[in-house]
Amino acid sequence: MALRIDIVTLFVEMFDGFLSTGVVGRAIQRELIEVHRTNIRDFSTNSYGSVDDAPFGGGVGMVLQCGPVYSAVEHVQGLASPKGHLVLLSPQGRPMSQLLAAELAAMPRLVLLAGHYEGFDERIRPLADCEVSIGDFVLSGGEVAAMAVVDAVTRLIPGAIGKEESVVEESFSDGLLEYPQYTRPREFRGMNVPEILLNGDHKKIRLWRAEQAKERTRQRRPDLWAAYVKREEDKDHRE
């Protein structure tokens, strides 16, 4: 059964190209996932079609109102069963990770709520089952974040990627960055492919790649490396 993903947004047109190309587009064509979009503006309660207003207490920007968002979400939840795990895209949310992508991919249905402007009225947050952030930086809206979540989740759906082992070997799958990759030519502008990748000894290649992944993670992402070391230590203690 295909994973159903609903995206509740102010800008449904932003997803046109994204949903028709690449891994996500192919997964939709293969009926591995189905993605539906709902425009929050369709649930405006005024003749102008606006869904935002100035913040109480003053300040710059506009804030998304409760009424249209609640109506849009409740409409979407009623379109299929189950009502879906509702993810609010927010800079205040849980950092997106491969582990979280796997958790979301295991859900029978996802509803992604993408905000815009200065943010949500705080009373919208109780709608969410979880809040997710894709990083400590500012975006104009949650649409790009929603695309990132959809892509990360789709890659974990069986059949979405041509070679299933490629998903396992990618960066972060085991908590480490991916090892260096090379292809033809063997030499380019004085830079050579490591000899170990050319000798056909697959056991040595696997060991080399594992060590390269560890070293690259240690150098470039000490936070990931520390977490990896702790997991390995905990594993040793359990054994």
Image (cartoon, helix red, strand yellow):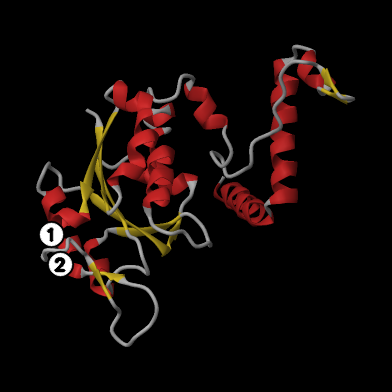
- Which three-letter amino acid code belongs to the residue tagged 2? Gly
The reply to whether the C-beta atoms of the residues labelled 1 and 2 are less than 8 Å apart is yes
**Label placed on residue 67:** 2
Q: Nearer the viewer, residue 200 or 112?
A: 112
Which quarter of the figure has residue 210? top right
Q: Nearer the viewer, residue 103 or 93?
A: 93
Q: Nearer the viewer, residue 50 or 192?
A: 50
Q: Residue 189: x, y in percent?
A: 87, 24
Q: Residue at x 33, y 36 (%)?
A: 16
Residue with the most extreme top position: 200
Q: Residue at x 49, y 20 (%)?
A: 163
Q: Residue 203: x, y in percent?
A: 71, 20
Residue with the most extreme front position: 48
- Which three-letter amino acid code belongs to the residue tagged 1? Ser
Vertical relation: 209 (above or below) 114: above
Q: Secondary structure at mark 2?
A: helix
Quadrant that contains the N terminus: top left
Q: Secondary structure at mark 1?
A: helix
- The answer to whether residue 41 is left or right of residue 172 is left
Quadrant that contains the C terminus: top right
Q: Residue 175: x, y in percent?
A: 58, 45
Q: Residue at x 26, y 24 (%)?
A: 31
**Label placed on residue 126:** none
Q: What crowding class fits label 2: few (fewer than 14 Cα within 10 Å), some (14-19), or many (20 or more)?
A: some
Q: Residue 96: x, y in percent?
A: 46, 52
Q: What crowding class fits label 1: few (fewer than 14 Cα within 10 Å), some (14-19), or many (20 or more)?
A: some
Residue located beneath label 1 in the image: 71
Q: Residue at x 67, y 52 (%)?
A: 221
Q: Nearer the viewer, residue 69 or 231?
A: 69
